[in-house]
Amino acid sequence: MPRSKISTCLGISLSLITRYVKRERGVYDIKSREIEEEIKKLASRIVEYELCGMEVDYELARIILYALSRKYVCAKHSEIDESIDPAKCYICPKLFGSLRI
């Protein structure tokens, strides 16, 4: 799919898509093969025009909430909020623990 169609589908500019492709934006390594595979599948579905708009938002939110439930984002959270101790925090697993990919 041309970037112009992806831009329209996602509601973002062509320049922003270029920044994502060049890994100048949106880069956070979760260090989970499972999450990485889900993101690759989602990207493929977008490029193949299987998903667009709110469907993409839904799938991305599902992946993000699952990553939160598995504590994959705790290290980044503790960088932003120094009061967070990933070893002791249970909030995300408790809130989102029943989610599955």
Image (tube, rainbow, N blue to C red):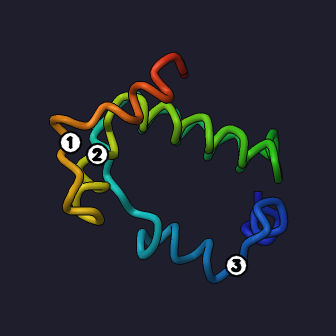
Up/down of 36 relative to 79, above or below:
above
Discs 2, 1 touching: Cβ within 8 Å: yes
Residue 94 x/y as whole percent: 42, 25
The CA span between labels 2 and 3 is 31 Å
Depth check: give the residue in front, 100 or 20: 100
Residue at label 2?
A: 74
Q: CA distance from mark 3 to mark 1?
A: 37 Å
Marks 2/1: CA–CA distance: 5 Å
Q: Is residue 25 left or right of residue 61?
A: left
Question: Which residue is drawn at the image coordinates 51% and 16% (left, top)?
Answer: 98
Residue ID at (79%, 71%)? 4
Q: Amino acid at mark 1?
A: Pro
Q: Quadrant of residue 93?
A: top left
Label 2 packing within 10 angstroms: few (<14), some (14-19), many (20+): many
Name the outermost residue toward the bottom.
15
Classify 29 as above or below 25.
above
Tell me, yes or no, whether the two marked residues, 2 and 3, touch with CB atoms within 8 Å.
no
The disc, 2 or 3, on the residue closer to the chain's N-terminal end is 3
Residue type at mark 3 is Leu
In primary-sequence order, the first of circles 2 and 1 is 2
The label on residue 86 is 1
SS at circle 2 = helix
> Amino acid under label 2?
Cys
- The residue singled out by tag 3 in the image is 14
Which element carries disc 1, helix, strand or loop? loop
Q: Residue at x 21, y 57 (%)?
A: 83
The percent coordinates of residue 72 (x first, y second) are: 32, 38
Q: Are marks 3 and 1 in contact (CB under 8 Å)?
A: no
